[in-house]
Amino acid sequence: MTTLDLTGLTTAPAQVWGGVRLVPLLRDEPIPGLRLRAECYGDGPAVVAVDPRTTYLSYIPHGFVATLTGDSAPTAAYGTTLARPGDRTGAPARVPVHVHRRMARRTAPDRLRFLPLHLAVEGYLALHFGGPEVVWEEWSQRAVRHGLSPREEQAYAGAEVRDLADALRLFEIHPRQCGVVVHVADALAAAFVVPHPDDYRALHPTLLQDMYGELIHHYATLGAPVPEFRSRLGGDHVRTLADLRAAAWRQRVEWAGFHGTTMAAGLLGTAYSVHRVHRLGHFTLSRFLPAFRPGLENHIGELITDRRGRTAYLKTFRLSEAQVRRGHLLSRLAEHDWHLPTTAAALGVTEAALGLRLDGAGFGALLREDVLARYRAAARREG
């Protein structure tokens, strides 16, 4: 288990539009040797061949391409072109790709194509996907033969999250900005980090094509506008320009601490299990899963780190409480070899209550019908 390391990134003052609060992330120096660009795949469904016997169906509006560069090699962000104002003939064409081989695939010795957030969601969907590892009598033949297949989760495109499109269109992009933390109704919705400011400028609009969970969509739809946190630098202690400069510096330090230790505590203050997906030079592409703590913030995501462990790329997805419960139940079952009585004792509930929890979480088909009927009858007697 490890925590996320955002060393080298500092926060700028947040910007608010309606229920959306965007916190810019700035780098003093870009991460050398890696650049990111986007490829657009259109609006149709895409099929990913995970392995010879498994396919993955999803709506994938875009992918990211990570490219190795020399530490000082001049490079241009994807989508830039030399043209006169108003001349759109040089605009990059859309790439109509609909069939992919694997979530992350090397397309050249120095280039890796991967599908943003789908790596993270694939890791969540694959959580104990094979089902019971020990064939206890409570599990159905379907559970033994097919595990959790098929398994599905719902998500919303960023364009469906109220106020997000306007916020991204209107807010200022800082010269050194390499990322952003998105809050919706002051709930942390997502974090996005890239290695270079030019990459962020090119990829800023892709936040509308990313996936956001049911909880965030719900908050955006029903939440009220959030207040702005304004700085007040006046007072008796500010008498000179140097005093004003010092007060502004103190305010920036306080903002950074507030956003890091308070607003983003649920993301940065927890441990994750990290699984390496691919290596590209001295960079490593990984995905991570939380400990699935019910009642608390839980995020999944993916990241690229360099040999020093610095985060060059990060993208996160906040799970809903129902998704957390499903992950929690599967993890606890796996810890106890899928033995229901032992797992129930560890959770401090009866075996019947655990069985009904599994049914409520959408895993009822894994249990034999007669066993589930017995659990329901026991619950009625106890109630």
Image (cartoon, grey):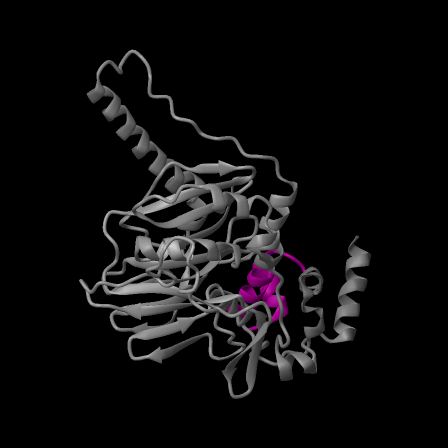
Residue furthest top in the image: 236
Check the picture and name the quadrant holding the N terminus. bottom left
The answer to whether one can see residue 3 in this image is no
Say which of 377 and 284 sits in front. 284
Horizontal and vertical percent for residue 47?
56, 78
Say which of 241 and 278 sits in front. 241
In the picture, residue 346 is in which quadrant? bottom right
Left or right, 110 with respect to 326, comes to left
Kindly identify the residue that appears in the image at 48 percent across and 55 percent down.
Answer: 207
As displayed, is residue 368 above or below residue 224? below
Kindly identify the residue that appears in the image at 81 percent across and 57 percent down.
Answer: 381
Residue furthest left in the image: 72
Which span is picked out in magenta? 326-350
Q: Main secondary structure of the magenta part?
A: helix
As displayed, is residue 131 above or below residue 324? below
Left or right, 41 with respect to 258, comes to right
